[in-house]
Amino acid sequence: MKKVLITGISGGQGRLLARRLTGEWDVTGVDRIPWIGAPEEILIETLDLRKRRLRNVIRLSRPDAVVHLAFVRHFRSDPRVRHSVNVEGTQHLLENCAEFGVKRVIILSSSYVYGAQPDNPRYMHEDHPLNVSRTFPEIRDLTEVEGLASTFLWRYPEIATSILRPVNTLGYYVHSAIGRYFKLDLLPTIAGFDPMMQFIHEDDLCEAIALALEHDLRGVFNVTGSGALPLKQAIRAIGKRRLSLPEPLADLLIGQAFRWNIYEFPPSALEFLKYPCTISGRRFQEATGFEPKLTLEDIFESVSR
């Protein structure tokens, strides 16, 4: 049986993926936090990707494939720590993959790297510029990670390396940025704006990653769910209330709330409540045959109160 190493295995998406692959792959996982109650057949190592112990795990387990999910994606952490974990941790992981003969590497990025811009095309393809650092510097780490991965892909063509950029992920287990937004009691929106948004269910994303493993993908691939709809319609579908704010007031209030630890998103995140960041998933569909199984209604029902 082929071996796969999942980083960030204790997170929601990591647990789902581990269970999905068990039986087809010999699964090992690493994470900075333990997975209490993990299935006995899955070996879990509690470690920091930046530490030397990672090298020993890869040297001893000799995985055929690595799926990299171990990123700090929330904004309350120290920016220096977030950058170190995301960028330095990825660099260390890739170096060990090259040293110990890993044959496939999958890195889970995000469609957010394109940035929310007023002049974005309706559905962006993989060669569209990554503009998120212009307006949302808090997640520029992801663009740096993608730069490392692109260099790695060029330097080690014998390793099937792929970068997946999924749209907003929702579900019971995954704690995504958009999921945390939808859990607010009152959802702020910007008066005069209602951007189109795309969603994918955590189970469908899990299946997409499994397909990427099966097909030895190389390069960058957008991963989309079952369609798009305006933000305000999504809020209604989940059964939440919204508060429409003029942009200057929203920027002021959310900035203060973020500094006072009341609101967990920085003001720069407001760009995604104003402008679209929708992508085309055709390249991934053609390469793998992927078709999402859950509809938008299914997705919203899984997170509605």
Image (cartoon, rainbow, N blue to C red):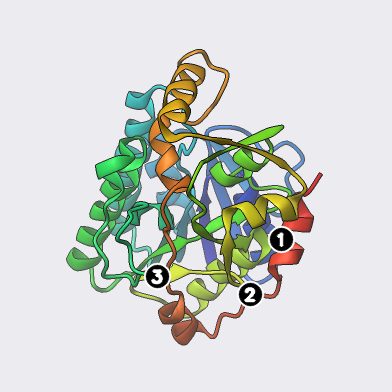
- Give the percent coordinates (x, y) of residue 281: 46, 75
Q: Earlier in the sequence, mark 2 or mark 1?
A: 2
Mark toward the viewer: 2 or 1: 1
Quadrant (top left, top right, bottom left, bottom right) of the N terminus: bottom right
Q: Residues within 10 Å of mark 3 (few under 14, many from 20)?
A: few
Residue at image location 74% in from the left, 49% down from the top: 172
The answer to whether residue 188 is visible is yes
- Alpha-carbon distance for marks 3 and 1? 22 Å
Residue at image location 49% in from the left, 82% down from the top: 285
The residue to which callout 2 is attached is 292
Element marked by disc 3: loop
Where 12 sits versus 278, above or below? above
The residue to which callout 3 is attached is 122
Quadrant (top left, top right, bottom left, bottom right) of the C terminus: top right
Where 228 sits versus 147, above or below? below
In the image shown, does 268 or 20 lie closer to the viewer? 268
Where 68 sits versus 280, above or below? above
CB within 8 Å, label 2 to label 1 = no
The residue to which callout 1 is attached is 299
- Alpha-carbon distance for marks 3 and 2? 20 Å
Residue sitting farthest toward the top:
260
Q: Earlier in the sequence, mark 3 or mark 1?
A: 3
In the image shown, does 257 or 76 lie closer to the viewer? 257
Where 149 sits versus 287, above or below? above
- Give the percent coordinates (x, y) of residue 196: 51, 61
At label 1, which amino acid type do we have? Answer: Ile
Element marked by disc 1: helix
